[in-house]
Amino acid sequence: MLLQNQIRCNNCGDTPFSSHRHHFSYCKCGDVAVDGGMDYLKRTGKPDGYTEMSIFMEDHVVKKLRTCVNEKLNNDLGKICGMMRVLRDEGYQVNKPEIKNGDC
Ligand SMILES: [Zn+2]
């Protein structure tokens, strides 16, 4: 599932995103643009003119995260912790690589 349709312009640094199917959005300098929302990825401009920032996630992981969000017994922090455990258990990196014992 596509969760975020976004790029970073390699010329101006702007980060245009497309929030819905027909939301066409240029960066500030006009070199590159995105379109397609969460339905498809469309890019305008040179392929080396942008850095991809889109976020994809498998459907079954999104389903597990939604379960965490809808958990009525947990407060907000409990929901966040539940979602982080889901991401960790599904193989996503959820901590900073440079974290060491005693940093917290
Ligand atoms: Zn630009």
Image: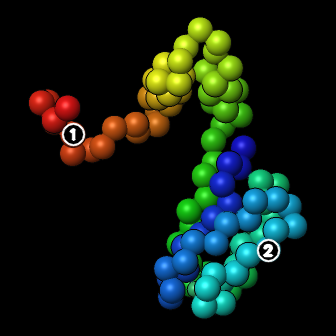
The residue singled out by tag 2 in the image is 24
Residue 97 shows in the view: yes
Q: Amino acid at mark 1?
A: Ile
Q: Which of the 4 image quadrants contains residue 71?
A: top right
Residue appearing at x 51%, y 86% in the figure: 12
Quadrant of ligand 1 in image? bottom right
Q: Is residue 5 left or right of residue 10?
A: right
Q: Which of the 4 image quadrants contains residue 96?
A: top left
Check whether the beta carbons of the residues at disc 2 and disc 1 lie within 8 A of each other: no
**Identity of the residue furthest to the right in this view:** 22
The image quadrant where one finds the C terminus is top left
**59 or 32: nearer the eye?**
32
Residue 101 is situated, as x and y percent measured from the top left of the image, at 14, 30
Q: For the residues marked 2 and 1, what is the alpha-carbon distance in whole angstroms?
A: 39 Å
Q: Secondary structure at mark 2?
A: loop
Vertical placement of 9 versus 75: above or below? below
Vertical placement of 83 versus 3: above or below? above
Residue appearing at x 53%, y 18% in the figure: 75
- For label 1, the crowd category at 10 Å Cα-Cα, with few meaning under 14, some 14 to 19 and many 20 or more, is few
Q: State yes or no: Cβ of the residue under disc 2 lies below 8 Å from any atom of ligand 1.
A: no
Q: Which of the 4 image quadrants contains residue 68?
A: top right
Q: State yes or no: Cβ of the residue under disc 1 lies below 8 Å from any atom of ligand 1.
A: no
Residue 97 is situated, as x and y percent measured from the top left of the image, at 27, 44
Q: Which mark is residue 99?
A: 1
Residue 86 shows in the view: no
Disc nearer the start of the sequence (2/1): 2
Q: Amino acid at mark 2?
A: Phe
Q: Is residue 4 left or right of residue 11?
A: right
The colouring scheme, among rainbow, by chain, secondary structure or one colour, is rainbow
